[in-house]
Amino acid sequence: MAMRVELIDVGVDVSKNALAVAHESEKVVEITNDAGSIRAWLESLTGPARIGVEATGVFHVELVEQAHRAGHTVYVIDGYRLNRYRESIGGRAKTDASDARLLLRYLQREATDLRPWSPPPKGYRDLQQLILRRARLVQCKTRLDQSLSGLTQLGPTRRGLIRHIDQVDQLLKKRIRKVLQNQQWLQEARRIQAIEGIGDITAAALVMTFQRGAFGSSDAFIAFLGLDVRVRESGSFKSRRKLTKKGASELRRLLYMAAMTARRSTTWQAFYQRHLDRGLTTIQALVALARKLARVAFALLKNGSEYRPQIRQEGCIAT
């Protein structure tokens, strides 16, 4: 008779530079979020493990991929679902250590309803890399333009450099369209480009993200993007609402830029203005609009429907 192998349950809170790791019978430990440290930690485990990790856009990827290759069962838990669980058990103070323990507790109680992580399709990785490379190119162009502005003697050189960067940008866009076409995602991207402010790269990034996760609701999608808000509490103190910023920063930037364009459209102008009238700052109102655009895109992708701006709810203030 085969012996039953007891799984080790682990909750891991992920940030850009560190991982907070919670085991059931041990205190939370912190390790560096890099390939070598993760490999060493996985090798230190005494047996197969179930590892619960909150989805963070990109910061959890190294851990998840290494753990999966090592034969462990990994569960990537969306931030919305985790926040709801925290509220249901009366969780308040939020630290990396408390989040790791929360993930461990959630995993132990809800694992039967969770789907183990599996590697994404190749198209996802290709799109992710192309979009990130284009983001760095755009940053390079902006810095170059700013650093050389006002130097009239370098005018021809500056124009030449900018022209070359624009050519590379067009090549990257062509490759992004090719990946979308190969994965049969191009039609979906074109459909959500009908939303005011959503350009081709933002559409590609939204489709890529949608294809990666099994999102049960727009709230889960928003949480994955890091556009959800969280109130940090400690005792009688309650801080102001802040974005969790757990997801991919480039897609948040693209959606923010989309909101800057959409706010001037007849469809979204009133929505944007209502948020300003409520006392929100310009940035806060733009973030609210970016979040709304993401929700609309999610609905189109989820339902396979076409965008119909004429049916926007005029009285709706929800974001």
Image (tube, rainbow, N blue to C red):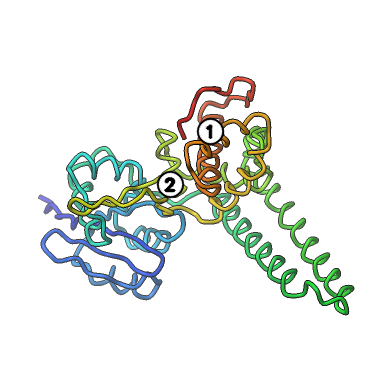
Q: Is residue 114 above or below residue 64?
A: above
The quarter holding residue 143 reads bottom right
288 to the left or right of 182: left
Image quadrant in which you'd find residue 31:
bottom left
The residue positioned 21% from the left and 50% from the top of the image is 92
Instruction: Give the total of numbered labels.
Output: 2
Q: Give the residue type that dot 1 points to.
A: Arg
Secondary structure found at label 2 = helix
Q: Residue furthest bottom?
A: 153
Instruction: Count neighbours of disc 2 (C-alpha within 10 A) and say few if under 14, some if 14 to 19, many if 20 or more.
Output: many
Give the CA distance from mark 1 to mark 2: 26 Å
Q: Is residue 191 left or right of residue 86?
A: right
In this rendered view, identify the residue nearer to me: 56 or 256: 256
In-front residue for pair 169/234: 234
Give the camera-side residue of 74 and 160. 160
Residue at position x 20%, y 63% from top? 47
Q: Nearer the viewer, mark 1 or mark 2?
A: 1
Residue 279 x/y as whole percent? 47, 41
Query: Do the CB atoms of the residues marked 1 and 2 lie less than 8 Å apart?
Result: no
* Residue type at tag 2: Phe
Tell me residue 81's x, y (percent).
32, 41
- Marking on residue 100: none
Residue 233 locus on image (x, y percent): 25, 51
| Residue occupying image coordinates x 40% and y 34% | 216
Residue 274 - label: 1
Q: Relative to 65, say whether 306 is above or below.
A: above
Q: Quadrant of residue 152?
A: bottom right
14 displayed left or right of 94 = right
Viewer-side residue, 177 vs 319: 319
Residue under label 2, please give it. Answer: 224
